[in-house]
Amino acid sequence: MSEASPIAFEASAQTGLSLPRIVGILFRRKLAIGALSALAAVVSLLMTIQKPTTYSVVVMFTPERAQASRGLGGALGLVGLGADPSQSPAFYVDLLQSRGILRKVATAEYTLPMKPGTVSGTLPVVLGLPMPGSPDAIDAAIRTLAGAIRPGVSGQTGVVRVTVTTRSPHLSAQIASHLLEAVNMFNQEVQRQKAGQQKTFTGQRVAEFRNELALAESRLQEFLQRNRDFATSSQAALERERLSREVSLRQQMYITLTEAFEQARMEEMRSAAQITVIQRAEVPIRRDPKGRLSKALLGALFGALVGISAVLLREVLRQARDSNAGWYLEWIEGLRKTRA
């Protein structure tokens, strides 16, 4: 077992601060502790009052589930086209904070009511940034957006929730709306690219299966021409059944791939919304609460703890000085050497 520090042991032995004595000391110094607690509460309250007024807007959405063609999922999965990570709600938390999405939102058009009249333009314009069309101004607007957006996802429902907070209620609502538009446009572009890949893949497979179906039908036709009395031979009957099953299988695959090809063509030209908006952006009527009471109470508690600690430390040092405690004398000597 490690030995305790001699100085610390001596300090604890000589202070003599029992619980009743501590209570008595704190009671005698209650005014000082209360004053420090009140001062900390006032400072916290003043800091809260100085905090700028903000307005928050919350939007919620879920991604549309892609409708895969029946019988094609396994084939697309074999070539890497079946998995779609953009369908994961957690994906959108990262997407909403990506520079590509933030740049689209920063360069979108805004119209904010001002006194007098209105201000219209991109985000750098309405923020009043110098040279709003410059790359530096756009980059500054992107950084501002990154600090104003708080995306999250519900673990139970998979709903994506985005909170936008700015000093303007109209700006918060318009940023939230542009975020939904940017995410939807991203999804549409991804869906078109995916549909294009599926169309190319299925188009190639349709041509291959068309040739294979024609070849299987040709083999069945040749067999029937050579074996018109196949019913009298069990071996010929089995061969006919095998060839017929092959033709039927090729027909099914050909029909499935043809349907998938047509569906991929329609998906490529599709412009419908790719997200389901649960809660749209609305201009907030009330400003965000500043939590003045809770912060004042926390400030008061912090001030009281600091006051209690200071009073007890002062009493420990006083007792050590009066009793000429060894650790106290060593500490004073160390301070003198440090000053010297």
Image: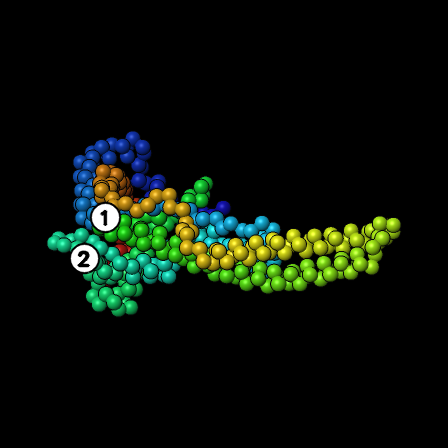
**Image location (x, y in percent) of residue 296:** 22, 40
Question: Residue 250 got which mark?
Answer: none
Q: Sequence-wise, which precedes: disc 2 or disc 1?
A: 2
**Image location (x, y in percent) of residue 299:** 24, 42
Residue type of the residue flagged with mark 2: Val
Foreground mark, 2 or 1? 2
Residue at x 33%, y 61% (from the top left corner): 103
Quick one: SS at disc 1? Answer: helix
Residue at x 66%, y 63% (from the top left corner): 211
To which quarter of the image does residue 320 belong? Answer: top left
To which quarter of the image does residue 302 belong? Answer: top left
Residue at x 29%, y 30% (from the top left corner): 20
Give whichever of 195, 110 is nearer the camera.
195
Give whichever of 210, 184 is nearer the camera.
210
Residue type of the residue flagged with mark 1: Pro
| Above or below: residue 141 compared with residue 31 | below
The residue to which callout 1 is attached is 169
Q: Is residue 59 left or right of residue 166?
A: right
Q: How is the image coloured?
A: rainbow
Is mark 2 in CB contact (under 8 Å) with mark 1? Answer: no
Q: Is residue 228 visible?
A: yes
Give whichever of 188, 177 is nearer the camera.
188
**Image location (x, y in percent) of residue 322:** 24, 43
Q: Residues within 10 Å of mark 1 (few under 14, many from 20)?
A: many
The residue to which callout 2 is attached is 119
Q: Residues within 10 Å of mark 2 (few under 14, many from 20)?
A: some
To which quarter of the image does residue 209 belong? Answer: bottom right
Quadrant location of the C terminus in the rendered image = bottom left
| Farthest-out residue, top | 20
| Above or below: residue 45 compared with residue 183 | above
Quick one: SS at disc 2? Answer: strand
